[in-house]
Image (tube, rainbow, N blue to C red):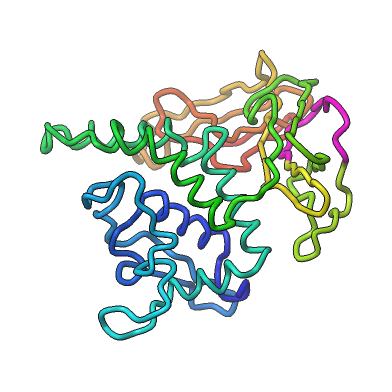
């Protein structure tokens, strides 16, 4: 299946629709696309999901994981065709590797300021409400008032009931990533088992075997971070692995060595030729990811860096 389907995307897609309790899904509203190349993989996207988050009069306790009309469907839809998406889910869920991947995505999105945390969903709703205020001044607030406060605990239990969460708790970090100073000491804890981790962004667990991955480290105390890194950790209790906890740490000095060394504003030829030149005057590489320049609609994307002594435009 990994040759044909983007597994991480599929797990995220399922998780989003499960959290939102999309009513007329899976038997009807779904779409998948792939690039028309030999290595292309199918990716699923939300489609026609207006009956969600209780807006179809479903209670906040509703469950579309075991509902026979949805993910548990073993029959046909109203076109008398097999419910393909439910079939994909059931076949993949039977494999322990997919169940652990799903648990990883639950850990990523429901914890440590993830996309499905209460604060993130409420914040996104308020952004949309403000955008629509001129045309829908009395937009209902059922989602932030009722759905968000209650749904998280309910859906996490629903996922646990169908073995889509690990029975071993994932490790906790004393800080969930972000900017830290050189020498920051990262500590970890877990309710049970031994914590294994990596500092190069790889999974501590070897896929499809359950063994330790090459180069994995056993946590025994605080870890001093001297350079920017992605930390990934799992706890293992006996032979059972926890979900994955991951965080990206960016080493940032209090006085950044970056300087704006040239500004080309309003040049002959128009805005296309405007630019800002930035130089790293320091002795080490600087991570630029997430940085921006006030007054300019640009944010440095994931993985952006500038080497010591280098200049970028």
Rendered image quadrant of residue 127: top left
Residue 40 appears in the rendering: no
Residue 91 appears in the rendering: yes
Left or right relative to 312: residue 121 = left
Rendered image quadrant of residue 289: top right
Q: Residue at x 52, y 43 (%)?
A: 109
Spot occupied by residue 173 in the image (x, y as percentages of width and height): 70, 30
Q: Is residue 305 in the magenta section?
A: no
Between 171 and 258, the one nearer to me in the picture: 171
Q: Residue at x 54, y 41 (%)?
A: 301
Spot occupied by residue 82 in the image (x, y as percentages of width and height): 38, 82
Spot occupied by residue 313 in the image (x, y as percentages of width and height): 56, 36
Spot occupied by residue 236 in the image (x, y as percentages of width and height): 79, 46
Asked if residue 69 is positioned above or below residue 289 in the image, the reply reads: below
Between 20 and 263, the one nearer to me in the picture: 20
Left or right relative to 136: residue 65 = right
Read off the magenta span. 218-231
Between 46 and 89, the one nearer to me in the picture: 89
Asked if residue 98 is positioned above or below residue 184 in the image, the reply reads: below
Residue furthest to the top? 255
Q: Residue at x 68, y 27 (%)?
A: 280
Quadrant occupied by the N terminus: bottom right
Asked if residue 127 is positioned above or below residue 166 in the image, the reply reads: above
């Amino acid at each position: 299946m990994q040759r044909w389907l983007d597994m991480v995307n599929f797990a995220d897609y399922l998780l989003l629709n499960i959290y939102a309790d999309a009513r007329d899904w899976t038997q009807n509203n779904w779409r998948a696309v792939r690039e028309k190349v030999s290595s292309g993989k199918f990716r699923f996207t939300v489609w026609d999901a207006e009956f969600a988050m209780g807006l179809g009069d479903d209670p906040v306790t509703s469950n579309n994981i075991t509902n026979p009309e949805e993910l548990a469907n073993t029959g046909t839809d109203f076109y008398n065709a097999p419910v393909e998406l439910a079939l994909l889910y059931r076949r993949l869920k039977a494999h322990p590797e997919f169940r652990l991947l799903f648990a990883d995505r639950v850990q990523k999105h429901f914890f440590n300021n993830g996309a499905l945390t209460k604060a993130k969903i409420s914040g996104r709703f308020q952004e949309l409400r403000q955008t629509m205020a001129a045309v829908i001044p009395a937009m209902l607030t059922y989602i932030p008032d009722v759905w968000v406060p209650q749904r998280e605990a309910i859906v996490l239990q629903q996922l646990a009931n169908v073995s889509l969460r690990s029975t071993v708790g994932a490790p906790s970090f004393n800080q969930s990533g972000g900017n830290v100073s050189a020498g920051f000491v990262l500590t970890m804890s877990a309710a049970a088992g031994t914590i294994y981790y990596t500092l190069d962004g790889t999974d501590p667990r070897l896929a499809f075997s359950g063994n330790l991955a090459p180069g994995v480290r056993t946590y025994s105390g605080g870890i001093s971070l001297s350079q920017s890194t992605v930390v990934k950790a799992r706890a293992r209790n006996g032979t059972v692995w926890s979900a994955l906890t991951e965080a990206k740490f960016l080493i940032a000095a209090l006085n950044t060595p970056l300087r704006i060394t040239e500004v080309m504003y309003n040049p002959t030829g128009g805005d296309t030729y405007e630019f800002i030149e930035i130089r790293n005057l320091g002795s080490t590489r600087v991570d630029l990811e997430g940085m921006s320049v006030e007054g300019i609609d640009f944010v440095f994307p994931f993985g952006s860096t500038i080497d010591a002594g280098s200049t970028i435009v």
